[in-house]
Amino acid sequence: MRNRKIALICPPTNYIPDKDYERKDWEINGLLCLESFLREKGYEPKIIDYREEFSLNNEYLKRIEKDIKDFSFIGFHTAIDSYLSLEKTISYLKEKRKNLPIILGGPLVSSFKLSEDNLIMKNIPADIVVIGEGEHTLLEILQCVEQEKKLNNINGIIYREQNKLIVNRPRMLIKDLSSLPYEDHMQWPDLKETINEKRWISALFSRGCYYNCSFCFKLMKGVRRRSLEHIEEEFVNIEKNLGKKSIMITDENFISNREWAIEVSNILEKYTTNWNCWLRVNDVDSDLLKKFKRNKCETVWYGIESFDEEVIKRTGKRITPEQSLKAIEMTKEAGIVPFGFFIIGLPGETEKSLEYTIKMIEKSGVLPRANLLCVFPGTKLYYDALRKGLIKDELEYIKKFAEKNRPQGDEILINMTSVSNQKLVEARNKIRDDLRIINEKNF
């Protein structure tokens, strides 16, 4: 009889994070949600994080084999920069434990959709792929395997049966996020030991997005929000175990419901030392930002992407450079530090548009975070690149992406502009290094 232990694994990745913003040991909210949900249902989940592993040698493979020896189920979180490690690790584990159910979930497998042509399932010998939200789907998989039942009635999965891929029906989105247990951050590996090194704990209060930006993979339409009571329970638990900490809210549409966001900020004022959030420039106003400041908001991160009107229009982001500049100014006036994400090399980019974006970053005083354009599977730009022949072999493209340390590296896999690769890299470096240093002096 199987035990009820399931390992939820973050595989190794070659991705090199920006030392001043991103960390490889940031919690993955999706895995924390799965861990809390399965534990509530009587299972024994454990998150294992291998993202600091840089070498996929025999020593690593033997280590993971040892680490999972007591588990009856294995689930892997998939992202494009971990493809090579997934391929090697899962092939190795299947040789060692043929009857071990291996399940894949996360953005990479979901970006290739619920289809028998799912590129990841076709090329990695996993048993089951979960497309989309995983809580109820994963629970049903574990129950079926335990009871030796067929998987044909589980919505939202692809599975192998006699070397054939079986594609089930799609699964509806979870209507009430508050029906799920809140994320128990204490279940993240070594959190108590590393918390003082981190700048913040990652928090997610809603799922989905109203928009359809060309560079962003979008799986869940619309926005569903957790209740205020549900959010407060999470912070009571954090304060009980860790004390008051700094929080980063990574919701894509945090203030699309203004009154709800204000009430969330009231909760954060009680339970955090300070908090930080991602906002859209077309959603903010002066009164809201001043209210956030009174409630301990320290920084706001805007997806500005470019200050060139034509470039930003092509993304379908539905913002304007004027809105970005106004949001930056209002944020500074409220006493909050404004950060801006910029993408270098979007379609329509020219040397002139790059020069203008650089000029406006310096003039506005926003603290910039710039990356080269990454064409992710499942996005509009990805399908454009396929149609134009810029991606000739999807699997080879995924493998190259996984080896090149994505946005922080200097190699551009797909250039969708008339600007040379060298000029794009130079612009990225100037924004990331020179302008960030200049603008940081103002804060």
Image: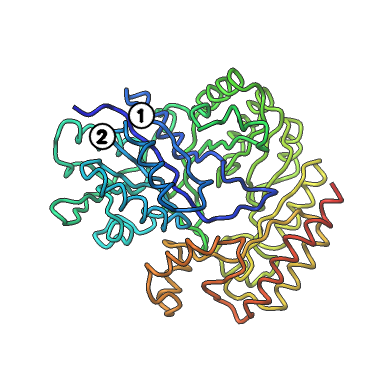
The part of the image, by quadrant, that contains residue 44 is top left
Indicate left or right for 437 with 128 as reference: right
According to the image, what is the colour scheme of the structure?
rainbow
Q: How many residues crowd around disc 1 within 10 Å: few (fewer than 14), some, or many (20 or more)?
A: many
Badge 1 amino acid: Leu
Task: Name the residue nearer the viewer: 297 or 31.
Answer: 31
Residue on which disc 1 sits = 38
The residue under the point 31% across, 51% down is: 92
The part of the image, by quadrant, that contains residue 30 is top left
Q: How many residues crowd around disc 2 within 10 Å: few (fewer than 14), some, or many (20 or more)?
A: some
The furthest residue to the front: 59
Residue on which disc 2 sits = 142
Indicate left or right for 22 with 79 as reference: right
Q: Is residue 146 above or below residue 85?
A: above
The residue under the point 58% across, 66% down is: 373
What kind of element bears circle 2? helix
Tag 2 near tag 1, CB within 8 Å: yes
The residue under the point 50% across, 32% down is: 188
Badge 2 amino acid: Leu
- Where is residue 364 shown, x and y percent of the image? 81, 58
The furthest residue to the right: 442
- Where is residue 394 shown, x and y percent of the image? 38, 69
- Where is residue 152 shown, x and y percent of the image? 16, 44
